Amino acid sequence: MKVSKAQAARNREGIVDAAARLYREKGLEGVGLAEITREAGLTHGGLYRHFESRDALAREACTRAFEWTITPQEGSESPGAEGACAGGLRALVYGYLSTFHRDHPGEGCPVAALAADVARAGPEMSEVFAQGVERNFQRFMGELQGDDPARRAQAIVTLSSMVGALTLARATAVGNPGLSEEILATVREQLGG
Amino acid sequence: MKVSKAQAARNREGIVDAAARLYREKGLEGVGLAEITREAGLTHGGLYRHFESRDALAREACTRAFEWTITPQEGSESPGAEGACAGGLRALVYGYLSTFHRDHPGEGCPVAALAADVARAGPEMSEVFAQGVERNFQRFMGELQGDDPARRAQAIVTLSSMVGALTLARATAVGNPGLSEEILATVREQLGG
DNA sequence: TGTACATCAGTGAACGCGCGTTCACTGATGTAC
DNA sequence: TGTACATCAGTGAACGCGCGTTCACTGATGTAC
């Protein structure tokens, strides 16, 4: 049956939200359209009223996932002995390299969850992704001090380390939990002081 | 038709080699058994004489991929002004964070290519992967100076940065080539001096 | 060394299954009068 | 404001396709005598 325009818009948002979460959890190749629409409380047939194709939905889901932001870890501000690290930055690093973030990719950083899939998903997806990455670099530069080119370099290096460490921690989490925790702890202490 | 034991062994190796390359190129979910056996010059039916299942082959392929080693980049030794970086290390970093490595995942680092897929592939695969990662940390520590716990920490941080930077560079390569090159250059100059 | 035959690596058709996509249909919405 | 009807979001069956896996079969290998 038909549905009000407002409800249709809400349904569309629900599909994008479900896709953004499921793709991060199971990978771009690991989820079908039936599962995504079911998660949004719909059936798969109506999906093409909203999206041209599976790839078009995946691109919107990727954009949506990039609206995610790191949750600063509470209690890691260390007001006394401040390391080689600006105030808010330490909490960001600790939040990103946390066991919770490692174990909840569906609500986490889209770069760590999707980058490898994106590299194989064609030019349009790569463009969407590159814009998200650039926006993250900009946002991260706001947290840093120093002159501009050096600030940007530091943002790139720090974010690369965080993405790499989280990726390694996830892949080793089940097979060698001690190693996984060691990677998280080592890199967050290095970056966060 | 039957085939000599020596030929059968060679065929088996060929399947594992093809799988190790194709999985790194297209992801664990992006290649079928038909394509892998075809690449090895065989048909798909006989695969189960050698491997219990698709997952068992994938595990062997992952082990095989971890036999890969970084090719040091020639001409990047910089014998005069040595940075904050040991001799052979600089060439390793420049080889890893090269455009060539970015564009040839099939013969490259299995961590950057497969980590995200491995995180979703179950406990046995995670164990295989964790062993490969640990072996890479050990190998990298051999290139570093300093006392042991610090050496290990440096190996973990450096490898995390390299994996993250290569992953980011690959995902953005088509959509924003300038950004992709900037990431590679920034991180290799930071790590390699 | 020669012969007879059991073994088994490899072939290719077939299976059930889930995928992305299409489409005839339903019925509440929203518009024209 | 009320009525008649066109619109179109959503349903669910159906499609062709490729997947992992199975299996009857082939015929060279390698062994027993």
Image (cartoon, coloured by chain):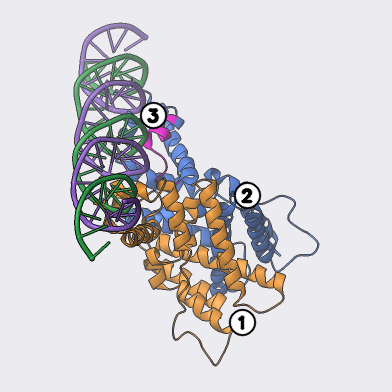
Chain colours: A blue, B orange, C green, D purple
In this view, A11 is above or below B157: above
Chain at tag 2: A
The residue shown at (31%, 33%) is A49
- Rendered-image quadrant of the C terminus of chain A: bottom right
The residue shown at (43%, 57%) is B61
Secondary structure under the numbered disc 2 in the rendered image: loop
Q: Which residue is mark 1?
A: B84
The location of residue C6, given as percent across then percent down, is 31, 45
| Res B75 → quadrant | bottom left
Are the residues tagged 1 and 2 within 8 Å (C-beta)? no
- Residue bounds of the magenta highlight: A27-38
- Marks 1 and 2 sit apart, C-alpha to C-alpha, by 33 Å
Q: Which residue is mark 3?
A: A8
- Marks 2 and 3 sit apart, C-alpha to C-alpha, by 31 Å
Q: Which residue is mark 2?
A: A71
Task: Work out whether residue B115 can be spotted.
Answer: yes
The residue shown at (61%, 76%) is B142
The location of residue A33, given as percent across then percent down, is 37, 36
Viewer-side label of 2, 3:
2
The amino acid type of the residue labelled 2 equals Thr
Q: Mark 3 or mark 2, which is nearer the start of the sequence?
A: 3
Please state the total of marks drawn on the protein image.
3
The location of residue A174, given as percent across then percent down, is 59, 48
Task: Work out whether residue A131 can be spotted.
Answer: no
Asked if both marks, 1 and 2, belong to the same chain, the answer given is: no
Viewer-side label of 1, 3:
1
Chain at tag 3: A
